């Protein structure tokens, strides 16, 4: 990325730049403002990356803690939001490597569900959501991260590339591969 692009990226939000400068100087209130600004956005990314709301919340907190600890080393080569999202993605990746597969819902528990038409519709919808979540979580992290950021979190492919340290075209290719893999995995739901 050219120096002009880096400068344009960093100067996109002067309020963010001011908060970062104050936080780097040790101002905890400025860092708290950054946390308030980005926690919901990061949580949405983390939920899609981890598949679990509690794990997502923990991962976001760990990412902010790591950002606070390493803030003196942040020199503004990218926007703070890009940097903190990269930290979050790395934390999700590390958690994924350390995690064990979860057991599916036993058939005995599913058998105890009522069999009314509305309950069956809800059960099918819940099963479909779970299938999508499991398919998303089964993607390799190098495909899941670009898909989550560019499709579900509203980042452009260029922004996703900056966050992940990839070119825009590599981000597009990986997101496309992820979509193809999801379509294959979810073919029975079509």
Image (cartoon, rainbow, N blue to C red):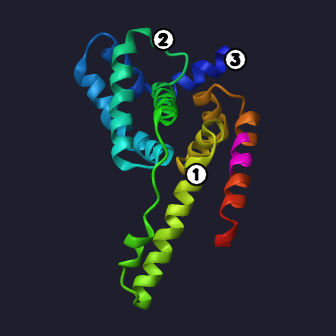
Label 3 secondary element: loop
The magenta-colored residue range is 174-178
Inspect the magenta stretch and tell me whether residue 166 lies in it. Answer: no
Task: Name the residue tied to disc 3.
Answer: 2
Packing grade of label 1 (10 A; few <14, some 14-19, many >=20) is: many
Seen from the viewer's position, the closer of residues 19 and 88 is: 88
Task: Name the residue tied to disc 2.
Answer: 75
Label 3 and label 2: CA atoms lie apart by: 16 Å
> Is 48 above or below relative to 128?
above
The answer to whether residue 28 is left or right of residue 186 is left
The answer to whether residue 20 is left or right of residue 152 is left
Task: Report x, y in % for residue 171.
Answer: 70, 37
Q: Earlier in the sequence, mark 3 or mark 2?
A: 3
Packing grade of label 2 (10 A; few <14, some 14-19, many >=20) is: few
Packing grade of label 3 (10 A; few <14, some 14-19, many >=20) is: few
At 29% from the left and 30% from the top, the residue drawn is 33
Q: Specify the farthest residue to the front.
A: 108
Label 1 and label 3: CA atoms lie apart by: 34 Å
At 65% from the left and 22% from the top, the residue drawn is 5
At 72% from the left and 29% from the top, the residue drawn is 167
Q: Mark 2 or mark 1, which is nearer to you?
A: 1
Seen from the viewer's position, the closer of residues 131 and 16 is: 131
Q: Earlier in the sequence, mark 1 or mark 3?
A: 3
Q: Earlier in the sequence, mark 2 or mark 1?
A: 2
């Amino acid at each position: 990325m050219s120096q002009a692009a880096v400068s344009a990226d960093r100067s996109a939000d002067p309020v963010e730049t001011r908060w970062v400068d104050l936080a780097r100087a040790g101002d905890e209130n400025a860092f708290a403002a950054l946390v308030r600004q980005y926690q919901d956005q990061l949580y949405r990314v983390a939920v899609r990356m981890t598949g679990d709301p509690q794990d997502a919340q923990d991962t976001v907190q760990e990412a902010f803690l790591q950002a606070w600890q390493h803030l003196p080393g942040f020199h503004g080569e990218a926007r703070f939001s890009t940097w903190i999202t990269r930290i979050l993605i790395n934390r999700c990746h590390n958690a994924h490597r350390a995690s064990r597969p979860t057991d599916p819902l036993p058939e005995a528990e599913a058998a105890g569900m009522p069999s009314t038409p509305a309950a069956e519709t809800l059960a099918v919808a819940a099963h479909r959501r779970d299938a999508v979540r499991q398919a998303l979580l089964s993607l390799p992290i190098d495909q899941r991260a670009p898909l989550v950021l560019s499709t579900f979190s509203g980042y452009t492919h260029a922004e996703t590339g900056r966050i992940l340290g990839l070119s825009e075209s590599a981000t597009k290719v990986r997101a496309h591969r992820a979509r193809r893999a999801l379509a294959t995995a979810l073919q029975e739901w079509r």
